[in-house]
Each structure stands twice: as C-alpha cells, then as structure tokens.
Amino acid sequence: MRKKIIQGFLLLILCLSLNKINAQDDTWDLRRCVDYAMAHNITVLQADVQARQAILQTKLSKGQSMPTLGFNTQAGFQFGRSIDPTTNLFTNQTTFFQSSSLQAGITLFNFFSIQNNIRASANDEEAYKLGVGKARNDIALNVAAAYLQTLLSIEQANIAKVQIDQTTAQLDNTKKLVQAGSMPELNAAQLEAQLATDSSNYISAEGTADQNRLQLIAYLNLDEAASFKVATPDVDKIPIPPLSELEPAYVYQLALGTQPLQLSDSMHIIAGEYAVKSARGAMYPTLSVFGQIGSNYGSNYLEQTGYRPFNDTTFTHGGDYIVQSASIPTFSKVGYFKQIGNINRSQAVGLQLNVPILNGRQLKTNYERSKLNLENLRLQLRADNLTLQQNIYTAYSNSVSAIAKYNSSTKAVETQQYAYDLATKRYEIGILSTIDYITIQTNLFTAKINQVSAKYDYIFKVKVLEFYKGQGVQF
C-alpha cells in the first residue's frame, strides 16, 4: 500500500513537471521568435539558397583554371565500303570496331580573364552571404513589429477587461442604490447598456489580438494550429536610449558601414569591376597545352604469324617439269587487348592558340554589357544609400513625434483618471448623471488605450533607430 502511494506521488510530480515544461515550450519571448524566424522563415531560406548557388558559381569559376581530363569511346559495326579504323584502308567486310581516347588540357594564358572571373564570383559570393544577413535583419524587424503589435493588442484587451470589471462593480453598486430608493432605475439601465458596449469592445480587442498573433506565427513559418503564447514582459523595463544618442546623421554614418544591404551592394560593385576585366580579357588570344592518347580495335585486323611451305610445279614443252619451292606468310586475328594496348595506340601533345577575330560581336557585347551592369550596380548603391538615409531621418522624426505623443497621452490619462475619481464620488452621492459618468469613464478608457498605443509606438520607433545604428533588435 505504501509503495503504491509513493508511486502515485512520483507520477503526480512527473505530470506536473511535464505540464510546466509544455507551458514553457508554448510561451515565446521576442528573442525566441526572432531566432526561430531567422532559421525557418521562407524569405531567409530563399536568401540562403541564393548564397549557396553563389558558392557553386565560385567553384565553377575556379574550375576553369584547372586541367581538363576526359575519356570517350565508341563501338559498332561497319557494313559495305568503309574505312578500316585499324588500317585506314577501304574495306568491304563487316567489321566490329571500337575506338577510345583520353584527352587532357590546361589553359596557360588568356589575358587574366579566368582569374578576374574567379575574383568576380568570389565577391558575388560574399555579397549573397551578406544578402542572407539583410533578409535576417528584415525578418527581425518584422517579427519585432508584429511581436510588439501583439503585446499592444493584448494590453488593450486587458484594459477593456478592466473597463468591464469597473462597469460591473459600478452597476452592482447602482442596483443596490436603486433597490434602496437612492437612485432611479434609469441609472442602472444606462450602466447595463455601457456594460454591453464594454463587452463588445473587449471581444473586438480579443479578436485583434488573435489576428496579430496569427500574423506573428506567419512570420515564424509556424503551423497556425500549434499552441503559441506570447510572453508578456514588463514593457516599462525595456531599455530606451535617449534620442541624443540617436542623431540621424550619426546613425546614418554608422549604418553605411554596418547594414548588410550596403555591404552587399559594395561587394557586388567589386565583383562587377572584376567582371569587366574578365570580359575584356576574353577578347584577347588564349594559349593552351593539350595531350591525347588513343587506340582502336577492329574485328578483322590481322597480323602475320608465320610461313607455310608451297611447291609450284611447272611443265616444259619437252614433257619435263620443274618444281619450285616457296614460303607463304600466314595471318591470324589480333586480340582485343593487344590491339588496344600496343598496335593501334597513338599519342599527341601540343600547343593551341585561339585568337578571336569575328564571332558575331559576342565578346564585344559581353564586355559592353558588363560595363553597363557595373554602372547599374553603382546606381543601385546610391539608391539604397538614399533610401537608408531617408528611413533613418524618418525614423528619427517619428521617434520625436512618438515621444511627444506618449508624454501627451500620459498627461491625458492622469487628467482623465483624476476626473474619473471625482466623477465616481459625485455619482455615488447622486449629484452626477449616469450619462455624464459614463462619458467620463469612456474618456478615461480611450485615454488609456491611446497611452498604450503611443508607448508601444515610441518603443518600436526608437528600436528601429537602434537597429540602424548596428545594434540589432534589442529588448
């Protein structure tokens, strides 16, 4: 009996522990959301695929400077009048043949086209790797915005819930006063109508919170049916640097050297410069060395293997005869490996000079296209820098406006809270109408909603400036 009690107690502890672990696994803070999105978001994964393709292109470019080696063979039957592959003589016999060859070559000099192409590919590879960083930064900002928006909607729902509790408490108190004859029944009816409005506001806030949660899940590339709860940290403890440390000109200069997009654009420009050199080098002669070894086999190929005696008798006019002796050579077919290995083997080695003269203007067009592409890359960097500068100055201006709006909304909450406290006292002693009381209560509710919205808006805009400063998304 005692053993069963102990086993049951241990099982209960295990179940509680598992429930606690599951609860922790279901709760996502911002850092976990950002890390997961960087590893699973489709846009980030696509950028990573592009980076891996660039790595393959670099390997392909390096392969152009390496020796080439190839083997080929062909086999078949010849019918009718054809050339014997082993003797190069015409024959009318049906012949089974096979030819094999091994070729090797290496480019000795091509006016640095290959080397510049390798450098261009290597810089493009680095640029695409930086592109992965840009995709991660973008998704980090999107996740942070969605996360804060979700927290905002949760807090707005909480405020709506508090509003319901306050209205419910006031309604209960009013009903008591109505029953005691201190207040008319109309006051209770008006509060019941306000409670219905508060409930509707709460339902809407809960729906908005659920929609924002789904948007956050979409950024994470999670299954929408999965259990997902957003951790609700103390927003007041989030470190907010003073705007004096986030001057837009200073942040812009830092961003030019830290933002992945600007670094990627610069690497693409360097790659474009090498591509121009490579395209120009392709218009000059190319010197290569080559070597080849080959052999043939023919089923009708014969070789002399010896002699056999031959006696020829010639008769004269007198009836006598003369016997002449001779030796006739004998032949036999040559085996496969003997033909391939020794008899029909051939070798060649030499230099090859390729001088492009007329090729339909392909090389010249490639050279001119590479220069235009380089010009476009430089323009793209200028455009991205202008966009970055505009975004930073806009973010700074928005931050200044956001903090002013937050301070104003905070003052409004304090004022409306004071008015609500006074109105509650006046209402409870019967010198304030229910409509006026509900209006003041609604004003306080609106002021709190505006304050919360302004607070989260200010936090995010300042964090955007921190992001451009090169500090990442910090909360």
Image: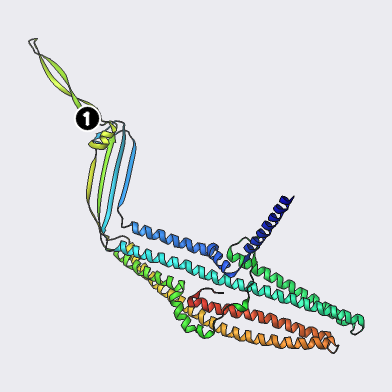
Residue 185 in view, yes or no = no
- Is residue 205 placed above or below 112 in the rendered structure? below
Residue 461 rendering spot, x and y as whole percentages: 57, 79
Q: Residue at x 41, y 60 (%)?
A: 55
- Is residue 166 placed above or below 70 in the rendered structure? below
Q: Residue at x 31, y 61 (%)?
A: 114
Q: Nearer the viewer, residue 384 or 436?
A: 436
Q: Would you name the residue on which mark 1 appears?
A: 303
Where residue 285 sits, quadrant-wise, is bottom left
Left or right, 319 with reference to 93: left
Where residue 302 sits, quadrant-wise, is top left
Residue situated furthest left in the rendering: 318
**Callout 1: 10 Å neighbours few (<14), some, many (20+)?**
few
Left or right, 171 with reference to 400: right
- Is residue 180 placed above or below 346 in the rendered structure? below
SS under mark 1 = strand
